[in-house]
Image (cartoon, rainbow, N blue to C red):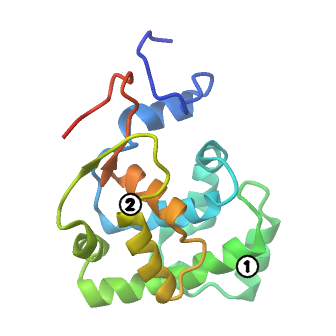
Amino acid sequence: MDSKKRCKWCNLKNALYIQYHDTEWGVKNFSDLYLYEMLILESFQAGLSWECVLNKRENFRKAYEDFDLEKVISYDDKKVSELMENKGIIRNKRKILASISNSKIFKAILCEHGTFYNYLRTFTKDQTFYETDKTTNALSDAISKDLQKRGMKFAGSTIIYSYLQAIGVIVSHDRDCFLYQEK
């Protein structure tokens, strides 16, 4: 274990969490595959900790066929039953069903905007936001409201805020974290 100071939420006993914190969280990654994966994973976080989801991430990747959007869109009742039996993922039927319907909405947004990041840019105006100790803001409120209007479930402002942190739109490392950045 190194002596680097990390964000207070990072469980220093979990090497996977440390790696996520140090190399992924808050790092800009706007590929559609990554944006899609993170949106699905964040929706499963609702009511749980990110650590719980992160620990199951590889199982989710297998269960969701490496987050192949076209495959997930076509999931039927048989596949939902299979996912409900998969002990390696979060087996919440409402979240599983939402992941499928949210995937269809994600695809519609891709068709409308070309990329999901282009959609996000209509809200962010290509800005990066630097703030700590928040769980929502006007940006996450606006994106959440629009996604919910489009029919997305498990896309409340807190989930969307967490999502924006994960993908690097909002940079939120604690002030005493070795990765802290200011504008």
| Circle 1 residues within 10 Å: few <14, some 14–19, many ≥20 | some
Q: What is the number of the mark on residue 3?
A: none
Identified at 50% across, 80% down, the residue is 103
Q: Secondary structure at mark 2?
A: helix
Query: In this view, which residue lies farthest toward the front?
Result: 138
Q: Nearer the viewer, residue 57 or 120?
A: 120
Pointer 2 or 1: first along the chain: 2
Q: Quadrant of the C terminus?
A: top left
Q: Amino acid at mark 1?
A: Val
For label 2, the residue is 34
List x then y, in percent, for residue 126.
17, 63
Identified at 57% across, 87% down, the residue is 74
List x then y, in percent, for residue 95.
68, 72
Q: Nearer the viewer, residue 146 or 68?
A: 146
List x then y, in percent, for residue 50.
59, 47
For label 1, the residue is 80
Q: Secondary structure at mark 1?
A: helix
